Amino acid sequence: MFDKKDLKAVNAIRCLSIAQIEKANSGHPGLPMGASPMAYVLWNKIMNVNPKKSNWHNRDRFVLSAGHGSAMLYSLLHLSGYDLSIDDLKNFRQIGSKTPGHPERKHTDGVEVTTGPLGQGIANAVGFAIAEKHLAAMYNKDGFNIVDHYTYAICGDGDLMEGISYESMSLAGHLNLNKLIILHDSNDICLDGNLNTSFSENIEQRVKAQNWNYIKVLDGNNLEEIYDAINKAKENKNGPTFIEVKTVIGYGSKNQGTNKVHGAPIGNDDFIEAKKFYNWEYEDFEISEDVYDTFKENIIENGKKSYEKWEELLEEYKEKYPKDYKEYINGFERKLPENWMEEIKKYSPSDDSLATRASSGEIIQDLAKVTKNFWGGSADLFSSNKTNIKNAERFSDTNPEGRNVWYGVREFAMSVIANAIVAHGGTFHHVSTFFVFSDYLKAGLRISALSQIPVTYVFTHDSVAVGEDGPTHQPIEQLAMIRTIPNVIMLRPADANEVRLSWKIALESKNSPVVIALTRQNVSNLEATQNIDDISNGAYIIKDSDKEVPDGILIATGSEVELALQTRDELKKSNIDVRVVSMPSMELFRKQDQAYKEKILPANVKNRVSIEMASSFGWSEFTGDKGINISIDRFGISGNFKDVQKELGFTKEEIAKKYIEKYN
């Protein structure tokens, strides 16, 4: 099965990886030197991909969870025929290159997800496997397995110490994701030293307890043993499979088996000696044609044949199941039916007041009817978040077509799994929890933004109006935190109609995650929102002054917009006539041209007040040096929500009083 040409190809991966790191004088050589054999076997003998059609829907997905080993991944991508040249490898870790320090989605051809923060790649792999299982259940027919692929990941010891690995692997085992295979680069070394200084778990017992199959490869340089292990894993019908591959970090270096080769170049002298050890006779970045041929004969040719066969199958599917075909393609293109917003309920002031989480829950039911590609999950809070799709089943091993994913109390894993579900393509996916618990998943949301993955995050119980649960459950700094993450659209809708339009932004987003923060308490359906059909400008005048130049401007978000309108009426009693602006999204407002910004917040109106039951951080940008920020720069209080609001100064009388004291 394997011969000298395979060993030569393995050493080509090693030497290309080391060369990148040496040229950049930066990187992590230990993993590529130790893990290249398993990577070679997986890529060149097992994986089903087409490098010339790298976005093929039915390709196998690969995640390098140990993203610091990026030089190895770039070497594989180059040798496999992806759009990555030798010159790109020479520019490893340089500004503007296709080969950044850690793999980045949408930056390098063939990279599925952004990895580097350890543990997240494992959850990504779980997400890909969930997406495959769900889409297969929705679209496959007898004789037409148009969705039928495996998900593979390579992780390191560090990944397995991260809490997210426990969360995500627990869920994967519970869901019986048998087409998920993780290879563990088990070298017993971490950055600071030997693994046993901080980790002593029995990996076999751990993964078996999480309902995974376990296979051990004793020699990480034995290509046959690795090949047999992966094929055995593919045969499993029950549970995902974890393959522990015992390797030597920095194999071939004088410092092999130590932390010295983990995260720093090995140096030119050691590289020369390592080449001798590998019997590698070529210059840096020089690859012989027979190595390229080895990859061409396997991954390239096999992938091309598999792709062409799948294309033929898809054409037959299109003829036989045109409606399903159209919906399948629309899912991957993130397309919705024409005039789909007409199917989403509008609200009037005569309708009963609703918490925005409740109106969102009603809108979710309408969205579920618009496309079957719409689904979501919650971290054990469906009943509170109101995000479950009614008349739809729970996603499970026995019902993979189910549209409600019960993530359990695993917020971090939920966000990162969702990243991969959406990155996989084919569906619109939302996740939900209490707003205060966004802290648990912030690292996943950050990668959503960095990776340009349009996951929808629904965070309910969005202020101190949570009430009795007290400060542990009352978000204060979370709005400011999320607003500081680049490429996140943060929406805090004022009422049901703004919620409706927030969902429009979320489903039409192509490259940004969208966060929708929703109330626990009821809010009125406002008169002015009946007549708006778009809030993508981020802010608009919800009630204007009767004067040509307003006496002042009240700017509010979410439930406080209604309070701002009440405060306007209160100020009227003192002959003060102000404009009220609803600002559901600071980020979207910042993107508007200067003319629109001036129209909403004219520079000559200096008397400005922001009203938001959260940290004041960031509001001075809109209220200016002379502005008043009615905010909460302390933790909340346990009590009835109306009493809490009053105690913290969120009443029309108190806000009007502060306005008059400062400006009149």
Image: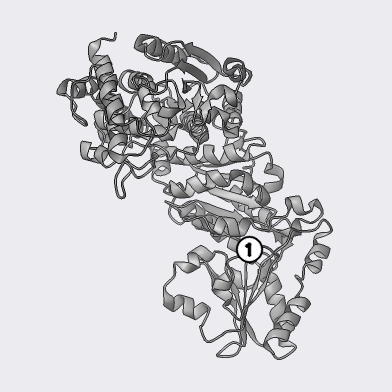
Q: Secondary structure at mark 1?
A: loop
Q: Nearer the viewer, residue 155 or 393?
A: 155
Apparent side of residue 355 relative to residue 294 in the rendered image (left or right): right
Residue 632 x, y percent position in the rendering:
71, 65
Residue sitting at x 49%, y 12%? 216
Relative image position of residue 514 (x, y in whole percent): 52, 53
Quadrant housing residue 493: bottom right
Q: Does 646 appear above or below 412?
A: below
Is residue 363 depicted above or below 626 in this figure? above
Q: Nearer the viewer, residue 555 or 525?
A: 555
Establish if 25 lies above or below 268: below
The percent position of residue 92, horizontal first and vertical second, equals: 30, 40
Q: Quadrant of residue 25?
A: top left
Q: Residues within 10 Å of mark 1 (few under 14, many from 20)?
A: many
Instruction: Name the one closer to the observer, 510 or 417.
Output: 417
Q: Amino acid at mark 1?
A: Tyr
Q: Quadrant of the C terminus?
A: bottom right
Residue at position x 79%, y 51% from top? 469
Q: Going 45% across and 23% down the picture, which residue do you hit? A: 258
Query: From this viewpoint, is residue 397 visible?
Result: no
- On screen, residue 253 versus residue 287, left or right, reads right
Residue at the far front: name it: 269
Q: Which residue is mark 1?
A: 347
Relative to 638, is 149 on the left or the right?
A: left
**Picture quarter with the N terminus:** top left
The number of callouts visible is 1
